[in-house]
Amino acid sequence: MGEWLQVGEAQNRAYLALPERGTGAGVLVLHASWGLTPVFTDVCDRLAAAGHVALAPSLYAGDTTATTVAEAETLRDTHDEAGEAEPVARAAVEQLLGFPEVSGTQICVIGFSLGAYWALRLSQVRPDDVSAVVVFYGTDDGDYRAARAAYLGHFAEHDDFEPLQAVRALEEKIRSAGRDVAFHVYPGTGHWFFEPSQPEAYDPSAAELAWERTLAFLNGRLA
């Protein structure tokens, strides 16, 4: 079980989970448009169980979360992402690296949908701090020439939000920048297939395979 704390000038809430052994590599978890729901705090707990120090900040000020797609879209649209989310994400990197329990000088960032965009963004603006990025069904249009991270992606075969053409274009852009990248597409799945709170989309077998791949990736990239 983790603990709640605050991050950033706006004092957004954040969830911290520590491994039983007390120390481990740092992993920043960035939530989807639902907000910081139990799905993402559970990801932190699972990462801690695997030996990592996991921090999940709320990219939204306040404690508001959503349960339906319409609510999530409204929640997302009522916040200034560039003005609110990015400062919090950057502050969370600093905070995570500053914890005495975090070993090493670099972290991994895992992002889901909305959070995937910010995970990719952090690897571009904080290249010395981010050595690995894992994205679940989220892309961006950034410039990866200054990035130093390795990338792992999990994407749905049928996704109105992230069509495969855009996924493959991003994979090629990252590879062309000289970075290690592996994107996996999960047959028969749709957006949010990793999240059990979305029963119409959740695919347990795909989610488990994505998790196994994620842990293997982290073990290979983080000290």
Image (spheres, rainbow, N blue to C red):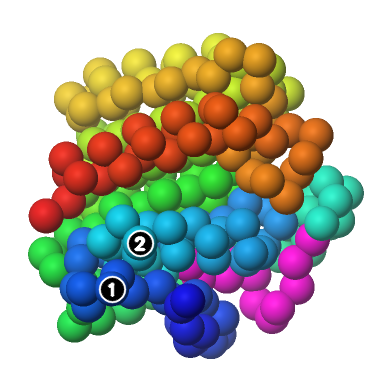
Q: Earlier in the sequence, mark 1 or mark 2?
A: 1
In this view of the protein, which residue sits in the foreground, 203 or 159? Answer: 203
Queried whether the magenta region covers residue 161, the answer comes back as no
- Relative placement, left or right, of 150 versus 204 is left
User: Can you say whether 194 is above or below 101 in the image?
Assistant: above
Task: Bin the neighbour count of mark 2 within 10 Å (Cα to Cα): few under 14, some 14-19, many 20 and up.
Answer: some
In this view of the protein, which residue sits in the foreground, 169 or 70? Answer: 70
Give percent across and percent down for residue 51: 26, 61
Q: CA distance from mark 1 to mark 2?
A: 7 Å
Q: Which residues are magenta?
A: 56-66
Mark 1 and mark 2 residues within 8 Å of each other at the beta carbon: yes
Does the magenta stretch mainly form a helix, a strand or a loop? Answer: loop
Give percent across and percent down for residue 59: 58, 66
Queried whether the magenta region covers residue 60, the answer comes back as yes
Give percent across and percent down for residue 195: 64, 44
Q: Look at mark 2 in the image and give the residue it sits on.
A: 49
